[in-house]
Image (cartoon, rainbow, N blue to C red):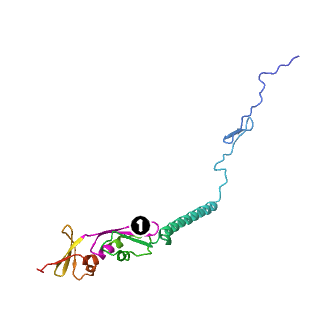
Amino acid sequence: MTVRPSSRARRPAQRKPFFLGSRLRRVSNTHTYRAPLMYGNLVPRQKESTGAVRRFFVLLVRSVLVVGVVAGVSWVLWGPYFRVTDIQVRGAVGVSSESLASLVPAGQPLWYPSKKTVERVKASNVLIADAWIARGVPNAWRLVVVEHSVVLRWRSGDMVSLIDAQGKARATIAATDPRLEDAKLQAVPEIVDPAN
């Protein structure tokens, strides 16, 4: 006699794949349990002290570099290589070039402001109408002056006026002013006002 398998026979249970994030895992046909959940970063944290030491060394290296750059620029601009040792005077005809050059302080930095020096040069002689300084790398200052073209001295009392070719009084100074002893001014004819 042939025995046929019953259609009602229980089929074998099929196991479903297990995933880490799943909440339920079938253990048997009747029992289940909750799978553990995992939170947080699985990578171990580095010690905070290591990061602090690294930041300190980075800050130290940057500070050393900044100080080195500042010191290098200061040495280039204010060091002995860029010191004024060559003083040239241009445009001086009636005024002595040596006297004007002596008004420029030698040995100062090339980039030193020249405004006070120019004012001192203008005040040194009434013949100077304008002056400026040009810098030459690495150690030269060129003093350029523009003189008044004085053709006549007009003495009135205790004052002397310097008259140019256009008939304008370029300067009026005291008759006892030592600047009138300049050789060029001594060669200029003088008119004395009899009314004073």
Which residue lies under the disc numbered 1?
135
Q: Is residue 135 magenta?
A: yes
Residue 176 lies left or right of residue 113; in this view the side is left
Is residue 126 one of those drawn in magenta?
yes
Q: Is residue 95 left or right of residue 6?
A: left
Identify the image quadrant of the C terminus. bottom left
Q: Position of residue 30 (x, y in %)?
A: 73, 36
Q: Is residue 26 above or below residue 135?
A: above
Q: Indicate left or right for 143 with 59 as reference.
A: left
> Which quadrant is the N terminus positioned in?
top right
Please state the horizontal and vertical placement of residue 45, each as a whole percent of the image: 65, 55
Residue type at mark 1 is Arg
Magenta stretch: give its range.
120-149
Q: Quadrant of residue 174?
A: bottom left
Q: Secondary structure at mark 1?
A: strand
Which quarter of the picture shows residue 176?
Answer: bottom left
| Percent of width and height locating residue 78 | 47, 70
Residue 12 x, y percent position in the rendering: 77, 30
